[in-house]
Image: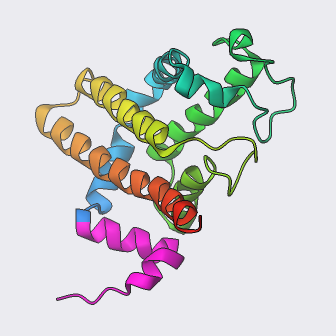
Amino acid sequence: MQQIDESKLETDSQYRYEYLAEFIGFGPEDVRFIQASAPHLGPKIGSLVEQTYTKLLSFDATARHFVPKQAGFDGEAPVDLAALDADHPQIRFRKDHLNRYFLALIGRSYDAKMVQYLDMVGKMHTLKAGSKEIDVPLVQMNALMGLLTDILFEALLDSPLDPEATQKTLRAYNKLFWIQNDFITRHYAATSSSL
């Protein structure tokens, strides 16, 4: 039986990642299948981003988080929800971030820097990073992760990959998104325990 330092899971993101990856079974073969999907998913990233933002902007509970000024955005923030649409410069700025997220998943090495990136993706939607005016509730982050998983899986199922490669690629992304989801929820758990 492996011994796990549970307190270290809460303080060391690399240790946490390694534990999750081993427990879930996310390894080098999964990374190879994710990276091998790049030629099929890469050309679809723009469409995946548009689908995501169409959904995010169709609910006030998710759209409201794009009204405050976003960290790193230099332009004018929308004055209210009515001024927000898919072509607003701040939304284009956020779309670019999601585009880079998809590119990171399919193109980066799964090393210590990638672990830090996955962790920052979770942290930036809380008051711990990014704009201090933006605090996205966990339910909205869970909804987003569910949506991203679904649209990505749909794109993979429409790709010309053979059935075995499709199955292995879907499983690899599923494992990765559970790891990403943990790297999101960990920052919410830390926030709620400190209240």
Residue 7 counted in the magenta span: yes
* Residue visible at 80% across and 40% down in the picture: 72
Frontmost residue, 88 versus 40 = 88
* Residue visible at 33% across and 67% down in the picture: 20
Q: Position of residue 19 (x, y in %)?
A: 34, 73
Drawn side of residue 157 relative to residue 192, left or right: left
Quarter occupied by the C terminus: bottom right
* Residue visible at 53% across and 45% down in the picture: 104
Q: Position of residue 13 (x, y in %)?
A: 51, 71
* Residue visible at 74% across and 24% down in the picture: 90
Q: How many marks?
A: 0
Quarter occupied by the N terminus: bottom left
| On screen, residue 181 above or below 143 | below
Instruction: Report the span colored magenta.
Output: 1-23
Find the residue positioned furthest to the left: 163
Frontmost residue, 160 versus 3 = 3
Drawn side of residue 64 relative to residue 137, left or right: right
| On screen, residue 40 above or below 140 | above
| Quadrant in the rendering for residue 182 | bottom left
Find the residue positioned furthest to the front: 195
- Please tell me whether the stretch drawn in magenta is mainly helix, strand or loop: helix
Colour pattern: rainbow
Q: Position of residue 123 (x, y in %)?
A: 60, 55
| On screen, residue 39 above or below 189 | above
Residue 190 counted in the magenta span: no
| On screen, residue 124 above or below 38 | below
Q: Position of residue 191 (x, y in %)?
A: 57, 61
Frontmost residue, 122 versus 93 = 122
Drawn side of residue 133 relative to residue 12, left or right: right
| Quadrant in the rendering for residue 101 | top right
